[in-house]
């Protein structure tokens, strides 16, 4: 059944794939972003999500694609996929990363709750585990990283994502809405597979992300499955491919780079260190895009 869905950050690296996937599955999509999504049937409404007034107005807007449609009357919004954010540290001052990411999320969830929108899928991050943007290289408490891990980040970006998860949990307690936080691994677009041979030559450069990755198309599928799966309440779920982004077996990566880190389970030969077991169980997610399909030097 077609739904009216608002995507925030739909002009971004991950968001544009989310918009495309939703459109391909027959949904009506309105993109809220600071820049227009080019070459898409989805309309972009230029919106500053840190401005509560703009967010409330945007969520009450029509989702139709253009101003000459048969009807411009707003229809009820079925779901929001909230991907808009400053995407990492070191591109804006730390306080701005935190302010923009936390306030935009609060405003989206606040407006959604007051409009009675019962489904929001939010982009969280693997950085919440505190390894990726730590000031010095840091060993995890255990591997693979799962949603029960005692997250303890020190950087402004990961902290903002952790606060966003807490904000979502609070709004769920208030409204009972389905609020799903996706802890997303390193997003890989199709063109990025050309970089993998370079990754293989220098595996230490992806140590901080524990060699995790997720194809942007698979991430879009995960977000859509979140929209289509009802009744889970508040949940946090990792989104990662089944395998590591290395041509080295997982056991070898662990021996070289995390020799003293305890393992929580027995791992497969190339198994991911960012566990995707929960999202598979709750949403029926199955990654379709393995780097070995696209890299000529695959072992």
Image (cartoon, rainbow, N blue to C red):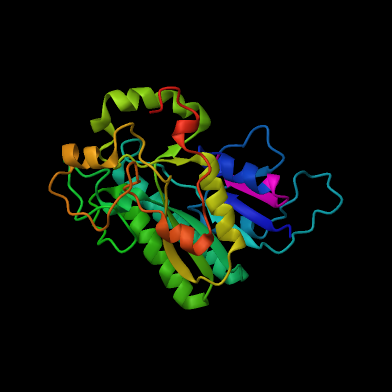
What stretch of residues is rendered in magenta?
23-34
Report x, y in % for residue 144. 29, 52
Image quarter for residue 238? bottom left
- The extreme right residue here reads 70
Tell me where residue 200 appears, x and y as whole percent: 31, 27
The residue closer to the viewer here, 117 or 107, is 117
Residue 106 point in image, percent of width and height: 45, 61
Nearer to us in this view, 99 or 7: 7
Q: Residue at x 61, y 71 (%)?
A: 116
Q: Nearer the viewer, residue 113 or 78?
A: 78
Quarter in which the N terminus is drawn: bottom right
Q: Is residue 240 magenta?
A: no
| Magenta run includes residue 26 | yes
| Quarter of the rendering containing residue 137 | top left
Residue positioned 79% across, 58% down in the render: 73
Residue 65 visible in the shown view? yes
Horizontally, residue 70 falls left or right of residue 299, namely right
Is 246 rendered above or below residue 120?
above
Q: Nearer the viewer, residue 120 or 68?
A: 120
Image coordinates of residue 236 in percent, x first then y, are 41, 62
- Point 58% across, 45% down: residue: 18
Point 39% across, 27% down: residue: 196
């Amino acid at each position: 059944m077609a739904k009216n869905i608002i995507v925030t950050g739909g002009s971004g690296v991950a968001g544009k794939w989310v918009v495309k996937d939703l459109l391909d599955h027959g949904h009506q999509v309105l993109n809220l972003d600071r820049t227009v999504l080019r070459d898409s049937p989805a309309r972009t409404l230029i919106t500053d999500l840190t401005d509560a007034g703009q967010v409330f107005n945007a969520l009450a807007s029509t989702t139709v694609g253009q101003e000459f449609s048969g009807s411009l009357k707003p229809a009820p919004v079925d779901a929001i996929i909230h991907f808009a954010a400053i995407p990492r540290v070191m591109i804006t001052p730390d306080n701005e990363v935190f302010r923009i990411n936390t306030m935009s999320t609060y405003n989206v969830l606040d407006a959604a709750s007051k409009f009675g929108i019962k489904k929001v899928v939010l982009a969280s991050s693997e950085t919440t585990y505190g390894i990726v943007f730590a000031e010095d290289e840091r060993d995890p408490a255990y591997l693979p990283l799962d949603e029960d891990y005692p997250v303890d980040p020190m950087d402004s970006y990961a902290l903002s994502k952790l606060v966003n998860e807490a904000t979502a949990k609070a709004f769920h307690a208030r409204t009972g809405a389905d609020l799903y936080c996706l802890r997303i691994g390193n997003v890989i677009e199709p063109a990025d597979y050309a970089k993998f041979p370079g990754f293989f030559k220098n595996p230490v450069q992806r140590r901080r992300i524990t060699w995790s990755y997720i194809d942007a198309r698979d991430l879009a599928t995960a977000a859509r499955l979140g929209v289509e799966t009802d009744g889970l309440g508040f949940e946090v779920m990792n989104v990662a491919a089944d395998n590591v982004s290395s041509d080295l077996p997982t056991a070898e990566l662990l021996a070289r780079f995390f020799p003293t880190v305890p393992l929580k389970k027995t791992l497969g030969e190339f198994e991911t260190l960012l566990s995707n077991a929960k999202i598979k169980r709750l949403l029926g997610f199955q990654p379709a895009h393995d780097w070995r399909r696209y890299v000529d030097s695959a072992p």
